[in-house]
Amino acid sequence: MTRLQDHIGTPPLLGTVPRAQSDIQLLRAIAVVSVVVFHLGASLLPGGYVGVDVFFVVSGYLITGHLVRQASETGRIDLPAFWARRLRRLLPAALLVLAVTSVLIWRLAPPSAWTQFLTEVVASATSWENWFLAGSAVDYLAQGNAASPVQHYWSLAVEEQFYLLWPLVVVLCLVLVRRVSRWELRRTLGTALGVIGAASLTCSILLTAHDPAPAYFVTPTRAWEFAAGGLLALLGPAVVVHRSRWRTLAGVVGIGLLATSLLTFTEQTPFPGIAAALPVAGTLLVIVGGSSLHRWSVTTVARTRVSSFLGDISYATYLWHWPLIVFAPMVLGVSVDLGTPLGWAVAASLLALTVVLAVLTKRFVEDPVRHASPLVDARPRRTAVLAAVATAVVLCIPISGLQTVAAQERALASTVDAYVSGGEPCFGADAAVSGCSNPVLADELLPPLSVRTEDTGDTFRCSAAADAPDFPGCTFGSDRPDATRVALTGNSHATMLIPGLVDQLEARNWRLDVYVGKGCEWRTPGPDDSEACASRRTLMQRAFTGARPYDIILVTSKSPDETSVAQQASIRSATLAAWTPVLDLGTSIVVLRDNPRVPTAAAACVDRSSAADLVAGACAFPVTDAYPTFDLNTATAAMTDGAVPVVDLGELYCSDGTCPLAVGNVLVYRDQHHITATWSRTLGPFLVDRMLDVTAHG
């Protein structure tokens, strides 16, 4: 053992302090208060989200110090025991909040949010919520997702991934130290931390600049913050000066850096990236300053009862505060708006309830399980088994909910098939055309609200991603040589038409090729195009001007939300330049005017309404709010002197000056601007008829 301890090196000074040291409690208090205040009212503390980064640094510091102390004392790392302690510390409270939240989702959340919310509960319970949110951030169909009541578990997932992987790195370094006589653990581990931290920081800077939405959540962009805390634990003797006044100054500067981050950072600050270095440095300096006993040091504040109390309940407070904030508007019907006296009262009540729940959770859940003799004195296997069983029990709630929603989706598919193929009268768009209603359908609404956001008809598999240089190659319909060749092009608003078009193809002897994708609509490539977009536009033009021209090309898309007059003119010019050679070949180009958009207030109304309410016309919005942007395709068609006709189905969406959310017992929109696949299928016959009316193929 003595020889191995020679390789371990001098124990780190800062790593030998008690785990409940006062400066750590102060940092936990600062971190949780910052996050809670930010979530209650971002205007009060615009950079409050950096509290999460404080937690990360503290975890890196404590866990590294613990592992190195264990190695120096025993010559080994007991991985099962380490992970068992982490499970006893983190899992009980986390599972309790997830179980309660799952029940509240069923009771309080709008049905349209069930799939997203319950999926995130599963992701949170299995420690991959951060990766789920990162994927949602880049998933076009998920970008309109509401903030779920378990979204804050992303940071806990990052921590748990650190707890899983970092001990393995320490064990690897310990093995290397045993085999190489000149190496000692502290320097070897410090080198590993430095390399990992540098790589992670580089990744954080680059990804934050290139793709900030997922960069915020993924573990590689956050690992360097844990590494910074670990390096401080390892390099304590080298960075802690012996003069108390300098340690005092370090703590004061650290508090200043944290305060600067909290008050000057905003939601527009590129983060994490290099900006995260400010709160990370502040946290490190507070830890250094915590070793000072000077009366003006941070230790003076850290040793107060308030600091200790908030530090003790910080974990449970973090877990409870966000579900309460999300569910409060659903229960009270008012948002947490700090601009009104009622908003302040709601915020204060939520804060008080959070503290009460946190205290109860720590007293009756966290501490009893953490210190339970049957678990602490037993082999780690017992903790692992009980943890797995408890997690499985909690997962039964969201998984049962997801299975219920899946059953509703299957029932939806068969019901819509029966109604569409059977020609159910006054169903969907037919009700708008005929001005009728079907009493047999009564208050039935399709798709059900619980599967509204998933009602895409699986057609987005045909949509090219923003960075894709080619299209997925979806082709539908007739294989006969005399089939009418039709192409569909545009962005996601064109993709939504596929379910309705596919239903019509065989009977009309049409073959449909799909050229849709995120952005990058059909026009000549421009100097600002990405390489992938230029490639797709070139491919489209070649396909549309090939040896065998298409008979009809249907064009529609969601126009950009904000474009200048100059940008509009440039887009029209580039679009017309792409259309002209295709028209010369005899191809009929048909523009479909973009569908209406749902105002925010109307979309929120849907979440508060029942199926019967929507069938009766609830949440309808004025037609004057339906088309907020300039339709560039329609404007371009107007420049062709009638060569490119425009089909406008607006009267199927809106009538008598209003646009209902449900028409003929069919829910029209799956979000604020995408239509449901069910509505698309009822719209299909009328769209194809109008296309034939305005082309030579009619």
Image (tube, helix red, strand yellow):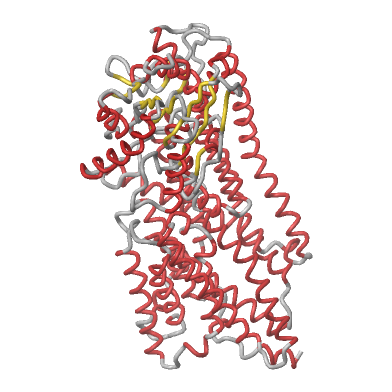
Q: Residue at x 55, y 61 (%)?
A: 158
Position of 364 relative to 183 (above/below): above
Relative to residue 183, is residue 107 drawn left or right?
left
Q: Quadrant of the N terminus?
A: bottom right
Position of 238 relative to 195 (above/below): below
Q: Residue at x 43, y 39 (%)?
A: 541
Residue 75 sits in quarter:
bottom right
Residue 654 position within the rendered picture, expressed as x and y whole percent measured from the top left: 33, 19
Residue 481 position within the rendered picture, expressed as x and y whole percent measured from the top left: 59, 22
Q: Quadrant of the C terminus?
A: top left
Relative to residue 550, is residue 188 drawn left or right?
right
Residue 412 seen in this snapshot: no
Viewer-closest of 529 and 376: 529
Residue 591 position within the rendered picture, expressed as x and y whole percent measured from the top left: 36, 27
Q: Residue at x 59, y 18 (%)?
A: 417
Relative to residue 650, is residue 323 drawn left or right?
right
Residue 348 seen in this snapshot: yes
Position of 652 relative to 239 (above/below): above
Q: How many numbered marks are there?
A: 0
Residue 122 position within the rendered picture, expressed as x and y whole percent measured from the top left: 61, 46
Viewer-closest of 615 and 239: 615
Residue 599 sits in quarter:
top left
Residue 274 sits in quarter:
bottom left
Q: Residue furthest left?
A: 565
Position of 55 relative to 337 (above/below): below
